[in-house]
Amino acid sequence: MLSFVLDSVYGLSITIVPFLIISVLNALIIRRLLHRYKRHKRINVITEESIIRMEFTVILLVVSFVFIVLNLPYCFVWCKRFFLSRKGMHEGPGSSDVGVDFDNYEGVLMITRVVFYMNYCVNFFLYSVTGAYFRKELKILVFYKSQYGEYMNCSRNGNSSPTTPQSWV
């Protein structure tokens, strides 16, 4: 019984609860973005700050959707395997329906677990693909390392130069 409770809490805490929270919040964010887009289209005022905010919002939406997509297969297979194992335990050894092929599910579970773990590896690439501002700063960091040090010292001392990006982040 304790194993069932712990497995249920585990399954809910790493899959279903985050899916629900992320899905609801993403829907609310997209709704708000559409309203803002319509308002900006009417007013026809676009600032650099609004562009940067929109870019970061898109990056975070992409990261959260990829989280859902990469975790959903593991969640599905884990839940199916879990419920089949519970069903097999309740039917007992004399039942004819107990012949569930757990080896097949174990292989599928391992493959989906790899996809699940990929979520922790792809965020850098998602930032690089979706964020022009991120790519610009990464390029400065990698290719202009000595200049970047001066750039950071300038912004730390409070001296603002035209090349210093201004952001709310």
Image (cartoon, helix red, strand yellow):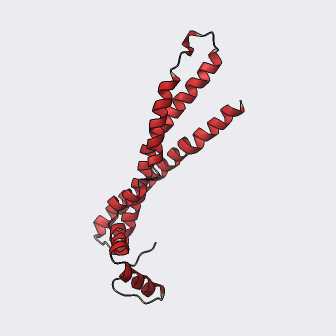
Could you say which is closer to the camera, residue 52 or residue 80?
80
In the figure, 37 relative to 81: above or below?
Answer: below
Q: Give residue 165's quadrant in the image.
A: bottom left
Where is the N terminus found, in terms of image quarters?
top right
Q: Residue furthest right?
A: 2
For the image, the number of numbered tags is 0
Q: Is residue 33 left or right of residue 42?
A: right
In the figure, 169 relative to 111: above or below?
Answer: below
Does the image show residue 164? no
Query: Measured from the top left, where is residue 138 in percent x and y?
Result: 36, 70
Q: Give residue 135's quadrant in the image.
A: bottom left
In the figure, 92 relative to 108: above or below?
Answer: above
Query: Measured from the top left, where is residue 162 in percent x and y?
Result: 33, 85
Residue at 41 percent across and 61 percent down: it is: 57
Query: Measured from the top left, where is residue 40 in percent x and y?
Result: 32, 66
Query: Measured from the top left, where is residue 54 in percent x and y?
Result: 37, 64
